[in-house]
Image (cartoon, rainbow, N blue to C red):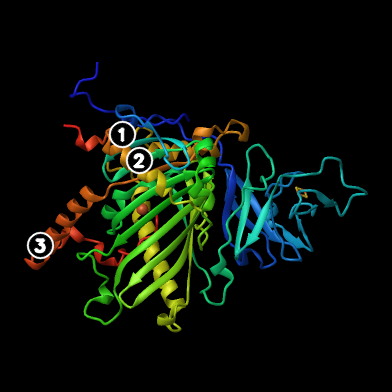
Amino acid sequence: MAVRSDSRFLDAPLVPVSCRVCGAGVRVRKSTWDQTSVQWDGEALASCTERRASGPGPGPSGEVFRGCGALAEAIREAAVLGEVRVRSEDG
Amino acid sequence: MTTADDVRSIEADALPTRFARGWHCLGLARDFTDGKPHTVRAFGQKLVVWAAADGTLNVLDAYCRHMGGDLSRGTVEGDDIACPFHAWRWGGDGRCTRVPYARRVPLRARTAAFPTVRQDGLLFVWNDPEGKPPPEDVTVPRIAGATSDEWTDWSWYSVEIKGANCREIIDNVVDMAHFFYVHYSFPTYFKNIFEGHTATQIMKGVAREDVRRPQAEGSSAPTVLGQTSVATYHGPSFMTDDLTYHYSDGDVDSVLVNCHYPITADSFMLQYGIVVQKAGHLGDTAEDVAAKMGEFIKIGFEQDVSIWQHKARIDNPLLCEEDGPVYQLRRWYEQFYVDAAEVRPEMTDRFEFEIDTTKPNAAWRAEIAENLAQRNGGTGSDATAGAGTGAAVSGPV
Ligand code: FES
Ligand SMILES: [Fe+2]
């Protein structure tokens, strides 16, 4: 049961972004200023400093790492610079 | 050539021929500790579950390797299960321990045993089509509240879902919009994170003005303002949800479990349970609150079930930008359906998807305003039919 492709991601693919703090290289897609998809790989995950510093929260779902603030900042900058296209801004 | 006028077809591959590798919760452990064997249909098989003298819960294939007797109709003898046909005794490790009328047990008298874990009041079995034991790092998280005096006991429910593959319930992890249309709730924040064998949904929501719990109308009962939910699947079937309800008189913290085990490729047993923290402002009503929340969540599941039982299986969903990562979720889910050696990084690599709720929220606010105007205008309340059931309290599914 091969999983098909998300045509949204074929039409506007993920593009590389690096974290200014730890250098983690991820791939990103933004359909609006407030919508973000982030694809990590093992190497990027291992280098993320915020992740390493984070401890598990309370509760059985507390293990989940919500996301990296430094990376979010880098993604925002990349979007402002036009390195990451924001789909809703396209005419 | 594709033209704008081409009709899009629904594609659906055959149902999977195997069952997911992973820990599956069979329900409350105490329901299996009455000294009797229990029949459980799961993973396309019939299983027998019984408690040994020391309380250990055992799970074997129900069919006796002697002449095929149904062990789940036998009797518990000490730690073993005795077959109703010729009384052969089987231990929890799957080995035949005794044939009462024979000099010795024959060679290779061993049947299929499922590894089990009894934890926080729940019974888990490990299913692996390759027959391997669970890896050390693949575990079920602890639910501290379940064993704490500061929390209620489990309110637990099960329902058999016929005519749907369990992928339908998995899909709901990413399905923000259905919470408004199916469950009459109002998500304002929605993010998914997939990593390793976990898939998480973080959701915040507010109560809808056009959906009121009937018992709250005109009464002084506290009203729900909204909820915060962090729900994680730990493997293919067991989800824990750290769920906080924000009431007008304070927060109520709870842990909701949503789990299932497949019966056949197109049926599954859906189970859910809830434990609630006995917060000060609840007084000694915490057990009632837990039971009531359980009832609301039950209504939520019933809303899902009626969708599943009538919908088509679809492998090529047509998505808009405001939909969640259905394809990426299914890519994650596939890791449980291939051999352990075939699990590829793309199935387990971390993926985050945060939805922009601006547009959906604007559309929903307009719809709610319309519903309220219609209601005040005295015309029928069709637009909110069924909404008065109090299902504004919904789970993460
Ligand atoms: S079939 Fe079970 S003892 Fe004979
Ligand atoms: Fe649902």
Subunit of mark 2?
A: A
Which residue is under mark 1?
A84
Chain bearing mark 1: A
Numbered disc 3: secondary structure: helix
Does label 3 point to a residue whose CB lies under 8 Å from ligand 2?
no
Of callouts 2 and 1, the N-terminal one: 2
Q: Label 3 lies in what chain?
A: B
Q: Residues within 10 Å of mark 3 (few under 14, many from 20)?
A: some
> Does residue B3 appear to the left or right of B105 in the view shown?
left
Q: Nearer the viewer, mark 3 or mark 1?
A: 1
Quick one: label 2, few (<14), some, or many (20+) residues within 10 Å?
many
Q: Are marks 2 and 1 on the same chain?
A: yes
Amino acid identity at mark 1: Val
Q: Are marks 3 and 2 in contact (CB under 8 Å)?
A: no
At 43% from the left edge and 46% from the top edge, which residue is drawn?
B193
Instruction: Name the residue tied to disc 3.
Output: B374
Give the side of residue B43 with respect to residue B207, left or right: right
Vertical side of B136 occupied by A58: above or below? below
